[in-house]
Amino acid sequence: MSSTDLETPPLKSILIAILVVVGLHVLTAVALVAMKPSAPKVAPPKQTPPIEIELVSLPAALPKEPVKVVKSVEKEVTKVVIDKSTLAPKPQAIIKPKPVTETPKKPVVQERKPDITPLVKKEKTTSIAQEKPSQKQTKQEEPNPAIDKAISEQLANNQKVNNQQAEQRRLVAAQAEKAAQEAQLQQAQAQAQAQEAQRVANAKASAEAANDAAQKAARAAKQAEKAAKAAAESNEPVNFTASSANWVSAPNFSFPERVARRANSGDTLNVVLILRVNKQGGIDNVRIAQSSGNAALDKEATRQVRSGKFKPFTNNAGVPVVGNVTLPVSYAVP
């Protein structure tokens, strides 16, 4: 045997190596085929726990509505399954993976690997993804008395709490309204009391002012009366003119015949007399303030004037007083 024969491996070892490699490949292929593909992660439908599903404001009969929603979801899921089954390959394609699991022959694996693997993956993923919700939904459809009782109790408690809160709010509102009404009533009473006090004060002030004015007027009248009485009692004569004197009975002034002999016919003789008139209007005294130049005529004039009478003279207070009256008298000589 030459050196080259020693360096080359024997044919038997080569065949064994080839068989080992081929067997490893076959085992790898079989393992890949037999291995279940990882199902895609499908987000499971959100199912809230029974407590979270509860609606506080809804009546006790409404918790059954979530079950109806689940049924509608089931119907939708079944519809999706039917649609995909129509689009998927025939049932024979689903049965085909059986020979792959039975015989790990090279040609079968090499020929069917590219065709079967995608179909198996699609079918399994869809079936798994569609079967899981149905199982959960069937579980949800099963009635659970404990859950229903808990839901009803929770709703009753919530309703009770709501009623208590509403009653408390009503009481607080009633108390606030009552307090506001009392405050308004107190304010109205205080305002009425203030107005009444102001009215009483104004009436009192008016009465006091009227009383003061009446007292002042009474004092003034009393003082005037006292002054008039004092003036009357003092008998101080008050001077009056002939125009301000009123006769009750006027005297008859006639030219005497015995004086006519000594006077010229057609002449006018004037004499001025000052009369003292008492409180009754009578003439108590007569004196000559200006003579006519004829003593007999002056004397006759003083006699004639005494036959007359005046209305009593009074002062500003209406009290009769003694008066001095200046009276001019004219005589025409016949």
Image (cartoon, helix red, strand yellow):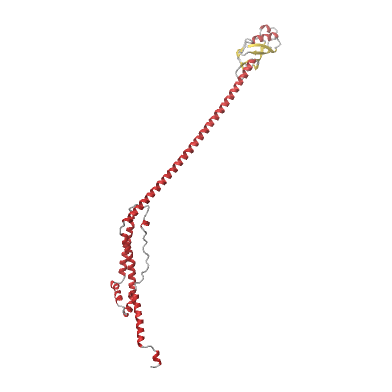
Which residue is depicted at the point 65% across and 13% down? 276
Can you say which quadrant of the picture contains the C terminus?
top right
150 with respect to 278 (left or right): left
x, y percent for residue 188: 48, 37
Name the spot of residue 122 as percent of width and height, x first: 34, 71
Residue 5 place in picture, x, y as percent: 39, 91
Regarding residue 128, the answer to whether it shows in the image is: yes
Q: Nearer the viewer, residue 251 or 309?
A: 309
Q: Tell me if residue 130 comes above or below residue 182 in the rendering.
A: below
Residue 334 in sight from this viewpoint:
no
Q: Count how many numbered circles sit on residues in the image.
A: 0
Front residue (pair 220, 7): 7
Left or right: 320 in relation to 91: right
Picture residue at 48% right of the left edge, 38% below the top: 186
Q: Position of residue 202 (x, y in %)?
A: 54, 31
The residue furthest bottom is: 2
Image quadrant assignment for residue 210 = top right
Q: Residue furthest right?
A: 293
Q: Nearer the viewer, residue 188 or 233?
A: 188
Q: Is residue 277 above or below residue 194?
A: above
Q: Quadrant of residue 281?
A: top right
User: Which residue is located at x 33 percent, y 70 percent?
Assistant: 124
Examine the rendered structure and indicate whether residue 291 appears above or below residue 7.
Answer: above
- For the N terminus, the image quarter is bottom left
Residue at image position (35%, 87%) is 12
Q: Nearer the viewer, residue 134 or 235?
A: 134
Q: Is residue 17 above or below residue 224?
A: below
Q: What is the residue that sits farthest to the top in this orientation?
A: 258
